[in-house]
Each structure stands twice: as C-alpha cells, then as structure tokens.
Image (spheres, grey):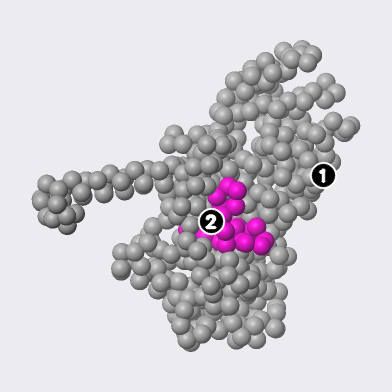
Amino acid sequence: MSFRRHLSSPVAKLLALTAVVLALAASSARAQFVNQQVGGVSIDANGILSTIQTDQLNALKQFRQDNFAGVPGALKDKSLRKISLRGLEAAIAEHQKNGTPLTDEIRYLGGLQRIQYVFVYPDRGDIVIAGPAEGWRLNALGEVVGVTTDQPVLLLDDLLVALRSTNAAQATGISCSIDPSNEGLARSAALIKRLTNPGDNIQPILDQLEQAVGPQTITVKGVPTTSHFARVLVAADYRMKRIAMGFEQSPIRQLPSYLSMIKSARGVNMHPRWWLEPKFDAIVADADGLAFEFREIGVKAMTEDQFLDANGQRQASGKHDTLARKWSDLMTANYQELSQQDAIFGQLRNCIDMAVLAALIAKENLAEKSGWNMSLLVSDEVPVEAYHAPQQVDSQASALRHKGAWVLSVSGGVLINPFAPLATFETGAELAAIRDRAAAPASGWYWN
C-alpha cells in the first residue's frame, strides 16, 4: 500500500495528525526548556534562579545549532548598517499575514551590535537606526554574537519590549535587584556574633550562614518580568556578584574577585554593594531634531558601603571604601573586554541602547515628526518570547575572615534611567549630512 493511499483512510489521517501534534508538542516543550537559559543562568517554573548546568548548556547549544540558519550574504559584511523601523514593521506584518515564522535577520535586527545613529525621515514616514554590524554565529553558550567581534547582536524582542515600556521606564526607571530579606540578615548577624575561629574547617559555617540568610528576592521594575530584557538585567547582576565574590573565575585577568583583593588590603568594607548603570558621554543632535548620535553609551559599575544596624538590617552609608571602589573601577574600565568574553554583559549594554532609543522616540516625539505611528511595533500584536519570571535565588556564602571581621555577601543590581542621557543635547552640525547619506534605497528594510 502506498503512503498516499494509506493516508486516505480517515483513521490514518487522524493518527498522522496526532503524531504531528505530539511531535510539535515535544519540540515546543524542548524549545521552552532550553530557551529559559539566558546569560549562563536558568530560571525554573517556580522562579528560582540558578547557574546553568553542563547538560543544560549542551542541550541549549545543540538546540540552537539545529535551528540556526545561515547568514544572508548581504549581512555578512562588517559595516555601518541601517535599519528602517517602518520597513522592519512591514516585514514583520508580511510574516504575520502569511503565517510564517520571523527570519533570523529580523529576529537579530540584521546583525546590528550597537545603536549609534537615529535618523528621522518625514518625507518617507520613517525612523532609521544605524550602527556597527556584521554576520553572526553562536558562541560557547549558544548566544548570537558577531563573527569577528564576539559582541552580542541586538534582538528584536528587546527592542519591542523597550518601545512598549517607555511609560513604566519613565515612572520607575528600569531596574533589577537581588536582595536578602531583613529577617535573613538579622539571623546571619546574630550567627556572626556567635562565631569563633573555625580554623581550616570553614564549610560548616558557610552552610549555617546560607541557611540563616535564606532565599534572596529578585525584583524587576520597568519592563515585564517575563521578558528577555528582564532576564538580561537579572543575569548580568547575578554574574557580576558571582565574579566579585569568587564563585566564578573572572573571564579576564584584569578583573580579579573582590575577595582576592581583600587579602592584601588594610581597610575593608564588610558589606559592599555594587550595581550597574549606564555610562554615556553625550547625545548629539542636529539643528532640526531629525538626526541623533549616541556617543559612547556604555555601562559602569557603582559602589556604596552598607552596614547592618542593631536589628541586622542593611543601611546605606552614602560612602564607599577605597577597595570596593577600586573593584568597581576595574569592572568599568574593562567592561568592553568583559562583554566579549561573557556576552551577558554585552547584552546588558545593548538593552541600555534600546531603552535610550525608546526614550528618545518618546521624549522627542519622533513618531509624530516622521508621520508614522509605529502601531504594530508598539502593540502586543507582535508577541515576544515569554520566560519564567525570576523570583528567588538561594543564598551562597563565600566568607573571608579579615582582621576579626567576616566578608560574607554583596547586594546591588542594575539601574537604568533611559531618560537621563536626554536631559541635554550637544549640537552636531555634521549629522544632517550623515543623515542624507544614510537615506534608504528604493526597497529593503536594511542596507549597508
């Protein structure tokens, strides 16, 4: 019996359809599992964050490799790439109309790695973003990075989230923090008072401290907690803390752990706090407000001393100690190289770019200037990937007894105010000419 005749039976058709549905369900379940991994961390269905395990990492890499399409020839070149947002919206709409999945060049925004320019074209009803770009590949963590720079590419999902979150970002900023509870800190403070010299066997004390502090709470503001954007914030914060406290080897030798630096220090802050926030030189604009340049928008690490009060609760001192500041300065100075070795830090910088872009469009009414309302991009009609919302992470104690005191943990987070760089603009007379040269060709949503 031929395959075609076999499928003519209603029962056979039902069985074939069932097999297809089951196969798709299995594929979807596997995709959902591996796609929960971002930046070397995993968050389960209960919102518990943990470091990705080797078998999970291998599954992630294999899944993404199996589904990795080749880079189109026009996007392989390293260049200043221009992306028409109106053209991008039209390309997305076409896929929705045909019921086809978005291509990699759309999902990866044509290999764009930074946003350097924003141009408005009222005569064409368009907003164009431009920046360095090249072809892309998968790195060891299964993340999409440039073939020569190892810098992560910008993602459509993060752009859509940024554009849809400007009101929340203006109201609260975009932030994440991973913090122990006040009760946990009080328990750990009481335990520390009872500690005696453990000699060489420090592990039982670390176990007690982890149990005393208990789970730490993850808080995200300004973007949906289930978004990839939120996952990047949390993963970058988590990885920063693990590097600082020596849980992970720093990928670059110029950034040792804070604990290793303490060993030779005299004065030490026992409760350091670090967080990441945007670092920028200026936003430059032309006289007509139709061309903008982002100059050196990056990331910097900040620090502040904290202390525990009589109830074991953290209090900000408004000061910083020399060693904690030295560590934050090292991270800031080496952030570019760090992002090449650990793509999550590059992804954070990309998210900052897109948050500032969205804030610029909102503050300067660029959609209105262009005569185009961006209706599809700013609506929920184009869905974004949903992840398990991060809620908690187990405490880990990495202790060092220094001159009679214990260095136990750090807190901090990521804080982005995307409207802050837009308070004042520098004037760039050359931008109008750059805008003219960057004008779109007759067709296509990206060009070099």
Task: Name the dominant secondary structure of the magenta segment.
Answer: loop
Give the answer, above or below, for where 203 lies relative to 277: above
Q: Which residues are magenta?
A: 136-158
Q: Is residue 128 visible?
A: no
Mark 1, mark 2: which one is toward the viewer? Answer: 1
Q: Amino acid at mark 2?
A: Ala
Examine the structure image and report whether residue 12 is included in the region drawn in magenta: no
Q: Residue at x 67, y 15 (%)?
A: 204
Q: Amino acid at mark 1?
A: Lys
Nearer to me, 405 or 319: 405
- Label at residue 169: 2
Q: Pick whichever of labels 1 and 2 is earlier in the sequence.
A: 2
Q: Residue at x 41, y 72 (%)?
A: 91
Q: Quadrant of the C terminus?
A: bottom right
Left or right, 111 with respect to 200, comes to: left
User: Which type of secondary structure does the marked residue at label 1 adopt?
Assistant: helix
Nearer to me, 109 or 77: 77
Q: Residue at x 47, y 66 (%)?
A: 106
- Label at residue 253: none
Coordinates of residue 188 in the picture (x, y in percent)? 65, 21
Left or right, 388 with respect to 359, comes to: left
**Quarter-wise, where is residue 372 in the image?**
bottom left
Left or right, 216 with respect to 293, comes to: left
- Label at residue 326: 1
Examine the structure image and report whether residue 150 is included in the region drawn in magenta: yes
Q: Residue at x 67, y 26 (%)?
A: 397
Nearer to me, 334 or 137: 137
User: Which type of secondary structure does the marked residue at label 2 adopt?
Assistant: helix
From mark 1 to mark 2, how far is it between C-alphas?
A: 30 Å
Coordinates of residue 249 in the picture (x, y in percent)? 72, 38
